[in-house]
Image: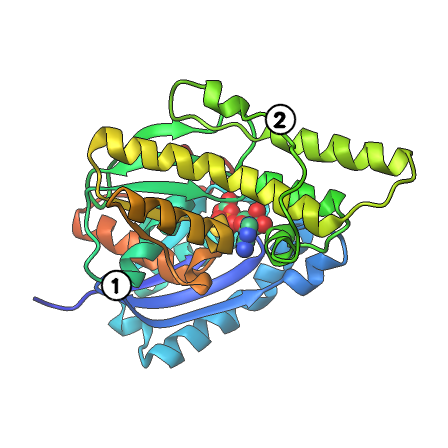
């Protein structure tokens, strides 16, 4: 069978990335230009600045990705681009760039849901992984549990009733005075702390389904910090991070394992930025082992935003003739449902 080369383009937040992926699983290049150092100054991503920096970097990132892969546009079979969800201005840059390339080089254009990209990162990391499997999506914008019924279809098992887990990590980090990006800093500091603060009495356990809730936990941490500050008492930030992290992780792990048991799924895959969290990776692996469930997750570089995962998701759509988009009319969308 002929090899298929997909050019992936990602610009939904603060990473400008272009990748070349062969047959959906083999990364030939995955160039990521991160804007973290710029946004750090403001304590979070500033959408306008993100858009401008995508414009400044994207052309160079494309050239680098093609050179590293040893390919030219002539070798590319299709272009896959994140069209949502994400920051609208940031998405516009990647989508318009992809449309222009598709028009100029007469290549099919595939519209990729960013979250499907996060899931596909696992097809790159685990060459034998194939549906069906359970997938826990834990990102800045999503917390969801689904069953992947094929490479391009899934059944939703549960979702968050309020905030996303990554949002909670970022908010807690900010309240703790930690630098952007918050999640990795909470992860790092939690290793030095103890779980000695009881932030919540597990209200999610009262949710009978597989849905999640993070706003109560987030608020409990914020209230704890405010109370301490008002009383002028010292706060051990490492303990706060550890106590929050264990609670946050416990919720997704318990529910995912319970769902795997209920639906007879033997593999649980973690996807999204928060799947980089070291405690989540450890805890899910240990719990899975206990119940004969194989827990998989991507290497850190593929957990956070990158274009290789978009190219991989695009490949599976391309071979099934799905999500083909017009290079004249494709429009980005800030919110896309899973
Ligand atoms: O998946 P992602 O790109 O967001 C969306 O696509 O919506 O991931 C970004 C999120 C941020 O909330 C970030 O703080 C979190 O992933 N994150 C982490 C870690 N690394 C990234 N959260 C906890 N521990 C980490 N090591
Ligand atoms: Zn993402």
Instruction: Using the rendered view, name the quadrant where residue 115 is placed.
Output: top left
Q: Residue 292's spot in the image, x, y percent?
A: 24, 45
Spatial distance from mark 2 to mark 1, Cα to Cα? 39 Å
Q: Nearer the viewer, mark 2 or mark 1?
A: 2
Residue underneath mark 2: 216
For the residue labelled by badge 1, is the local secondary structure a helix, a strand or a loop? Answer: loop
Q: Which residue is drawn at 69% across and 44% down?
A: 240
For the residue labelled by badge 2, is the local secondary structure a helix, a strand or a loop? Answer: helix
Q: Is 191 placed above or below 225 here?
A: below
Q: Can residue 92 be seen in this view?
A: no
Residue underneath mark 1: 25
Q: Can residue 278 be seen in this view?
A: yes
Q: Quadrant of the C terminus?
A: top left
Q: Residue 128's spot in the image, x, y percent?
A: 19, 59
In terms of depth relative to the viewer, which is nearer, 305 or 228? Answer: 228
Q: Residue at x 41, y 42 (%)?
A: 137
């Amino acid at each position: 069978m002929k090899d298929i080369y997909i050019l992936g383009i990602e610009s939904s937040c603060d990473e400008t990335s272009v990748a070349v992926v062969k047959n959906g699983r083999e990364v030939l290049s995955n160039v990521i230009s991160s804007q973290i150092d710029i946004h750090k100054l403001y304590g979070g991503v500033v959408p306008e600045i993100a858009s401008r920096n995508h414009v400044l970097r994207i052309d160079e990132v494309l050239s680098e990705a093609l050179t590293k892969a040893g390919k030219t546009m002539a070798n590319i079979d299709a272009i896959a681009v994140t069209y949502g969800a994400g920051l609208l201005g940031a998405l516009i840059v990647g989508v318009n760039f992809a449309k222009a390339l598709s028009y100029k080089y007469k290549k099919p254009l595939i519209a990729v849901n960013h979250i499907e990209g996060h899931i596909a990162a696992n097809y790159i990391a685990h060459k034998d992984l194939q549906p069906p499997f359970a997938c826990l999506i834990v990102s800045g914008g999503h917390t969801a549990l689904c069953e992947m019924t094929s490479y391009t279809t899934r059944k939703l098992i549960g979702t968050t009733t309020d905030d996303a887990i990554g949002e909670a990590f970022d908010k807690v980090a900010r309240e703790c005075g930690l630098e952007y990006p918050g999640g990795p800093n909470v992860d790092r500091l939690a290793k030095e702390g103890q779980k000695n603060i009881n932030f919540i009495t597990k209200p999610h356990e009262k949710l009978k389904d597989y849905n999640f809730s993070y706003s109560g936990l987030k608020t409990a941490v914020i209230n704890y910090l405010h109370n301490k500050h008002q009383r002028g008492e010292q706060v051990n930030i490492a303990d706060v991070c550890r106590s929050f992290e264990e609670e946050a992780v416990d919720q997704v792990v318990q529910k995912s394992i319970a769902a795997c048991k209920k639906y007879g799924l033997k593999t649980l895959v973690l996807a999204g930025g928060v799947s980089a969290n070291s405690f989540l990776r450890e805890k899910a692996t240990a719990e899975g082992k206990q119940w004969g469930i194989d827990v998989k997750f991507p290497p850190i570089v593929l957990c956070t935003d990158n274009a290789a995962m978009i190219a991989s998701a695009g490949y599976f759509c391309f071979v099934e003739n799905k999500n083909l988009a017009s290079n004249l009319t494709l429009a980005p969308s800030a919110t896309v449902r899973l």
